[in-house]
């Protein structure tokens, strides 16, 4: 059973600052066109009253935000959805001991604008399943995908007509197809204290037009394979479990 709340950007900002955080959890954003702080005072007061009302009967919202502020692992999701109404996908999950929370920021009226913020609180690692369930519903890719050594992606020094069917060119054509959704998922340890950082492990999810959804991973090999919701959840869960296991086995 999950608890859920919908907060304005300002309401979330005040609640987040109350936990001692001065940076929003990436890629969640707060934006305001108001230039004079005094002009926001009535909105600040209304937001503070709303938060007080939400916390009057129990501290569930506080505990959900605390999980996001002090997780053992976090998951960031950021990307674009193009289906006739272009918009950005923004989610951030935190996983702690026995509980997890998820933030989802609704898109604004324009492409690069942001809206209200939904907060979900789950027992265990339920936020991962919630995150996957909120991805745009798309069938798995219908092809076999691709797999190639990263070194083989370097362009050749010379080119011939035969190169059109080389493994490199086949992969390039596969990846350059039109897409409806492209999001990057990053899984990392601890809290996200300073926005986007280079640490962590990355996955990419791409929905190709007239084909379907693929999972892209880049290591020694670049691989793309058809992706179901169950496979995506298992892939993210595996990365989270690895972080939690490393923390449990650490000497200090």
Image: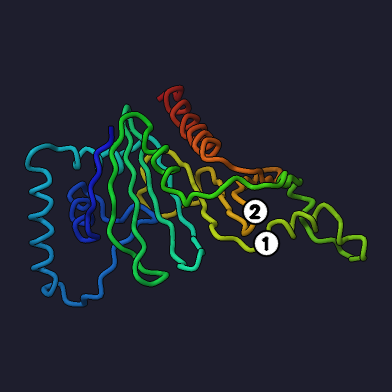
Query: Between 228 and 204, which is closer to the camera in this rendering?
Result: 228
The image shows residue 134 at horizontal and vertical percentages of: 41, 47
For this view, does 213 lie left or right of residue 236?
A: right
- Which residue corresponds to the image point at 37% horizontal and 38% vertical from the top-left? 127
Query: Marks 1 and 2: CB-CB under 8 Å?
Result: yes
**Crowding at mark 2 (Cα within 10 Å: few <14, some 14-19, many 20+):** some
Q: Which mark is residue 163?
A: none
- Which residue corresponds to the image point at 71% horizontal and 44% vertical from the top-left? 221
- Which residue corresponds to the image point at 51% horizontal and 64% vertical from the top-left? 82
Which image quadrant is residue 231 in? top right
For this view, does 23 lie left or right of residue 222?
A: left
Q: Which mark is residue 211?
A: 2
For this view, does 153 lie left or right of residue 179?
A: right
Q: How is the image coloured?
A: rainbow
**Crowding at mark 1 (Cα within 10 Å: few <14, some 14-19, many 20+):** few
The image shows residue 225 at horizontal and vertical percentages of: 66, 43
Quarter of the image with the C terminus in it? top left
Task: In the rendered view, tell whether residue 208 sits above or below residue 72.
Answer: below
Mark nearer the viewer, 1 or 2: 2
Quarter of the image with the N terminus in it? top left
The image shows residue 202 at horizontal and vertical percentages of: 54, 46
Q: CA distance from mark 1 to mark 2?
A: 10 Å
Local secondary structure at mark 1: loop
Residue reaching furthest bottom? 35
The residue carrying mark 1 is: 177
The image shows residue 251 at horizontal and vertical percentages of: 44, 22
For this view, does 34 lie left or right of residue 76?
A: left
């Amino acid at each position: 059973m999950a608890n859920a709340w919908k907060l304005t950007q300002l309401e979330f900002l005040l609640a987040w600052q109350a936990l001692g955080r001065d940076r929003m959890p990436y890629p969640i954003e707060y934006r305001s066109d108001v230039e004079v702080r005094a002009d926001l005072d009535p909105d600040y007061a209304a937001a503070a009253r709303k938060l007080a009302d939400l916390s009057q009967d129990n501290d569930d919202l506080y505990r959900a935000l605390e999980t996001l502020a002090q997780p053992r692992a976090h998951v960031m999701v950021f990307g674009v959805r193009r289906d006739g109404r272009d918009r950005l996908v923004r989610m951030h999950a935190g996983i702690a001991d026995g509980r997890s929370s998820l933030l989802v920021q609704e898109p604004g009226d324009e492409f690069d604008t942001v809206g209200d913020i939904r907060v979900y609180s789950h027992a265990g690692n339920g936020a991962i399943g919630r995150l996957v369930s909120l991805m745009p519903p798309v069938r798995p890719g219908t092809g076999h995908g691709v797999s190639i050594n990263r070194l083989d992606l370097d362009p050749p020094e010379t080119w011939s007509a035969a190169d059109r069917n080389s493994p490199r060119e086949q992969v390039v054509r596969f990846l350059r197809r039109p897409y409806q959704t492209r999001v990057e998922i990053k899984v990392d340890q601890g809290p996200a204290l300073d926005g986007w950082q280079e640490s962590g492990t990355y996955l990419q999810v791409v929905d190709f037009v007239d084909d379907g959804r693929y999972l892209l991973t880049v290591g020694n090999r670049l691989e793309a394979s058809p992706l179901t919701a169950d496979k995506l959840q298992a892939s993210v869960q595996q990365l989270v479990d690895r972080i939690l296991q490393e923390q449990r086995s650490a000497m200090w």
